[in-house]
Image (tube, grey):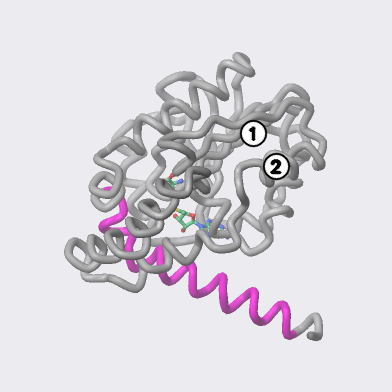
Amino acid sequence: MTETATKSIASNKSEYINQIFAQIAKHYDLLNNLMTMRFHLKWKKDAIDMAIKENKHIFKALDLCTGTGDLALFIHKKVKNAQIICIDNCHQMIDITKKRLDNINSPTFELIKADCENLRFNNSSFDLITIGFGLRNLINREKCLTDSYDFLAPEGVFACIDLGHPVNPLWKSIYGFYFYKIIPLLGFVFARNKEAYTYLADSLSGWYKQDELKEILIKIGFKKVYYKNILGGAVAIHIAVK
Ligand SMILES: C[S@@+](CC[C@H](N)C(=O)[O-])C[C@H]1O[C@@H](n2cnc3c(N)ncnc32)[C@H](O)[C@@H]1O
């Protein structure tokens, strides 16, 4: 395949993903709360706690694929004066997040519409970089990861929370059933959008297994990398220290 054809497929896929998030933005928080019985908030808080344990000196943080800003808000709660830059490329998500962050009325947030695969920050600019349920959606994930490494200051922490691959076969089939059957149904009932929530299940194929992501982070150069499985590996939090 020619380079132009590869680029064109990637750009179509990225537009498709952008459309999916544009369609679900309005119902995003509601569906997350329903799908996880609000546990996603606890998991996100745990991810921030784990990251801050590794680096207590957080002055500047970057939240990639910020969506409605949950991780950014948890960072703010923990480190009141940290400057937090939030990035998302979907303007419908950005609009919702803007209102949410405006309510906090803190000058510490900066919300930028940009592509996380094409970011330009100076090296060593951040003490913490987070990405929640976002890396899986990127076409060029390794670029985002190597960029994150470069953007982090020494001792800086990268924290990723995302879906995982359960190891236990029985749990894996229950998980598959939930993602392929129940979630699209919830999407249809509550957001009138079965396709968008079928994408969520599809996004799992080709997504890194927990050990794979750990190995990639080590290969990139992070000196301490580990992960914590949640719900038998249905969700995983990866922490990587530069
Ligand atoms: C599943 S949501 C996660 C939102 C939030 N981080 C959370 O944990 O709830 C994924 C977000 O990534 C954004 N996104 C997807 N691809 C992106 C890209 N290439 N650049 C920036 N944002 C992207 C989507 O618009 C969406 O808001």
Crowd tier of the residue under label 1, counting other residues whose Cα lies within 10 Å: few below 14, some 14–19, many 20 or above: many
Which residue is pictured at 68% across the width and 51% down the height? Answer: 144
In the image, is residue 82 part of the stretch drawn in magenta? no
Residue 221 is tagged as none
Crowd tier of the residue under label 2, counting other residues whose Cα lies within 10 Å: few below 14, some 14–19, many 20 or above: many
Left or right: residue 134 versus residue 180 is right
At mark 2, the secondary structure is: helix
Q: Quadrant of residue 57?
A: top right
Nearer-the-camera pick, 157 or 120: 157
At mark 1, the secondary structure is: strand
Q: Main secondary structure of the magenta part?
A: helix
Kindly tell me whether residue 111 is visible in this rendering. no
Q: Position of residue 132 (x, y in %)?
A: 49, 43
Mark 2 lies on residue: 148
Left or right: residue 93 versus residue 132 is left
- The amino acid on which the numbered mark 1 sits, given as a three-letter code, is Phe
Magenta extent: 5-29
Quarter that holds the C terminus: top right
Q: Is residue 24 above or below residue 57?
A: below
Q: Position of residue 138 (x, y in %)?
A: 59, 59
Mark 1 lies on residue: 158
Kindly tell me whether residue 113 is visible in this rendering. yes
Quarter that holds the N terminus: bottom right
In the image, is residue 7 part of the stretch drawn in magenta? yes
Cα separation between marks 1 and 2: 7 Å
Instruction: Looking at this view, name the residue that lies furthest to the front.
Output: 170
Which residue is pictured at 61% across the width and 48% down the height? Answer: 209
Labels 1 & 2 near each other (Cβ < 8 A): yes
Left or right: residue 23 versus residue 55 is left
